[in-house]
Amino acid sequence: MELLRNFERFARSRPVIECAQCGDRIYIPEWSESLDGGRVRHLWKCEACGYAFETTVCFEAEVAA
């Protein structure tokens, strides 16, 4: 049972995006680029149907201590 618990914890730590067209899972982006202001843009492409889309993630700026 320990192996199952470790797998479940690992599975929750990885974001999984589903294709909006066919519902297949996409695990990693095709590419990512850092933008200004703590933003990162990801290009996702579904291997099953070829559908591609972008997402943008915003990170909070670190506060200097």
Image: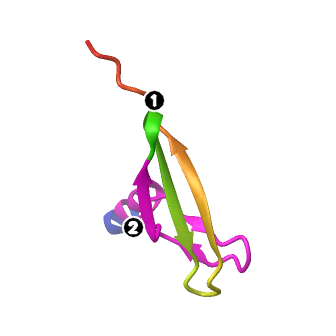
Vertical placement of residue 56 versus 28, above or below? above
Vertical placement of residue 12 versus 22, above or below? above
Residue at image coords 35%, 24% = 62
* Amino acid type of the residue that numbered disc 2 sits on in the rendered structure: Leu
As helix, strand or loop, the secondary structure at mark 2 comes to helix
Mark 1 vs 2: CB contact within 8 A = no
* Amino acid type of the residue that numbered disc 1 sits on in the rendered structure: Glu
Q: Residue furthest top?
A: 65
Q: CA–CA distance between discs 1 and 2?
A: 34 Å
From the top left corner, tell me how far across and down residue 45 is, in percent: 56, 75
The verdict on residue 57 being magenta is no
Q: What stretch of residues is rendered in magenta?
A: 6-34
Is 34 left or right of 48, judged from the image as shown?
A: left
Q: Which residue is mark 1?
A: 60
Residue at image coords 54%, 68% = 44
Which of 12/33 is in front?
Answer: 33
Is 31 left or right of 65, judged from the image as shown?
A: right
**Badge 2: residue crowd in 10 Å (few <14, some 14–19, many ≥20):** few
Residue at image coords 36%, 66% = 1
